[in-house]
Amino acid sequence: MKILKFGGTSVGSAERIKGLLDIINPQNRQIIVLSAVAGTTNALVEISQAYLAGDKDKASALINTLHDHYRTLISELFTSDEGRRNGEELIDYHFSLIASFSSKLFTPVEEKIILAQGELISTTLFHFHLTELGIRSKLLPALDFMKIDEDNEPKIDFIREHLNELLLQANDHNFFITQGYICRNAFGEIDNLRRGGSDYTASLIGAAIGADEIQIWTDIDGMHNNDPRIVKGTEPIAHLSFDEAAELAYFGAKILHPQSVFPAQRFNVPVRLLNTMAPNAAGTLISKDGMAKGIVRSIAAKDGITAIRIHSSRMLLAYGFLRRVFEVFERYKTPIDMITTSEVAVSLTIDDTKYLQEIEQELGDFGTVEIDRDQTIVCVVGDFGWDTHGYASRVLDAVKHIPVRMISYGGSNYNISLLLKTEDKVESLRSLHNRLF
Ligand code: ADP
Ligand code: ASP
Ligand code: MG
């Protein structure tokens, strides 16, 4: 069984939805994971923000615009009266649900219900489209099997058990369709796997059922060696190891959701990144084999980082100090990305600032605390094991004209990370690209 995930642009218009059948062979046994139609989740975020702000007029104007967009899509997608009617009934249902929140109390629970509508619509439209063409397919409701726990971590055993049950019930089908991104949380409420989460859905499904392969179909021919939105002349990478791909995804390569490599890696399911606009391009294969030795593979950047420095003379020759610092972050369920230490200070970075104030206050018991916002982690991935040499100096040489706040090297064999001001990101990515490739 293969898992094929198509992102927002790959289902971005009636023409693109129709074009999926140039890529998908309906005879194969497969699960298709779809994102929302491009732009939809952003629009749903805006609608939710209008509700949260109590601006119902703005919310309903945004809802009408999005509804109209879908009316056009449906008129272009379906050829029969019945197909069009089914499509219209579907979007009328979802848009009246979205509009029904205007008169109610609006909390994050309602917000997540709204954010889920995009994937619910795209998958059902695709299913209706296939039905109109006489192709049998089965919709698998992600809300019946995709589950996260109280720490927002996916429950892989639950997913496996419930998904297998659904597949068994529909054992006269080969062609399955499900929603990316959406799930249920520990309270049974509708939730999501965070923005870009459809990649994570595909990886979790592939891992849970031991798929042969996970294919992530998007609008570019694989993982490039730098951010193509910022740097000119980037090139696709034919093969990455799970570790390399995980570092790149985690540290900002937008083509993959930050956590999406881990499930595939844990259950050793190869992942292919492929281009819907150029289906014959080789793309990128991510698998357990062969990390290329002695070369720089790729560069990525992650914005929205906050650096925290704790300076304390009590740290000198003290054991247990770092444990107490880490415990503060553990209490507030705030992951640390980078860390460096000296005799009397420790610097670390976080991207989730929900409890920053509380963390700052508790760390204040240990010493002086300095906070720097608007930082970016630039991550260079390659084979930098201790038996190689010269890479750290090449990386630092490339950014010698840029102030660097932190450097992390040696944590793993394949990552050199720099922390710098977000305003210096573009220049650092370009300069590293020119020097390293
Ligand atoms: P989808 O909607 O299919 O999930 P995304 O927009 O989430 O697509 O991801 C694809 C985009 O990621 C590309 O269009 C590209 O601009 C961006 N991107 C950022 N970094 C990289 C990289 N290193 N390699 C390839 N694409 C990247
Ligand atoms: N539709 C969701 C988003 O825009 C999930 C995804 O595209 O992967 O974030
Ligand atoms: Mg994406």
Image: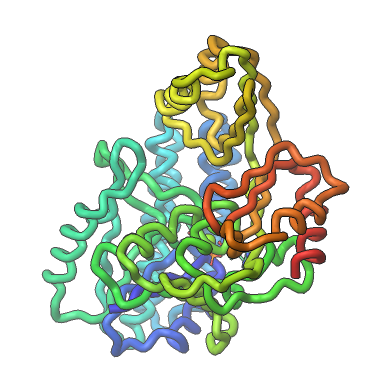
Which residue occupies the foreground of this view, 83 or 230? 230
Name the image quarter holding residue 238: bottom right
The vertical placement of 436 against 281, above or below, is above
Left or right, residue 191 beside residue 382? left
Q: Is residue 39 visible?
A: no
Instruction: Tell me the quadrant of the picture where the C terminus can be found.
Output: bottom right
Q: Residue at x 36, y 88 (%)?
A: 25
> At 81% across and 56% down in the image, what residue appears?
398
Image check: 300 left or right of 218? right
In the rendered structure, the answer to whether residue 83 lies left or right of residue 36 reads left
- Foreground of the two, 60 or 429: 429
Residue 102, compared with residue 399, is above or below; it is: above
Q: Quadrant of ligand 1?
A: bottom right
Provide residue 145's location: percent of width, then percent of height.
24, 56
Q: Is residue 137 visible?
A: yes
Q: Quadrant of the N terminus?
A: bottom left
The way the protein has been coloured in the rendering is rainbow
Q: Where does residue 250 sit, x and y in percent of width and height? A: 53, 52
Residue 178 image offset from top left, x and y in percent: 33, 66
- Residue at the far right: name it: 401
Where residue 8 appears, x then y in whole percent? 52, 65
Q: In the image shown, does 54 or 343 lie closer to the viewer?
A: 343
Q: Tell me: residue 202, above or below residue 174.
A: above
Q: Is residue 245 above or below residue 137?
A: above
Residue for point 52% across, 32% down? 52
Number of marks in picture: 0
Residue 307, by quadrant, is top right
Q: Residue at x 40, y 51 (%)?
A: 116
In the figure, is residue 121 to the left or right of 414? left
Task: Return the residue found at the far top.
Answer: 365
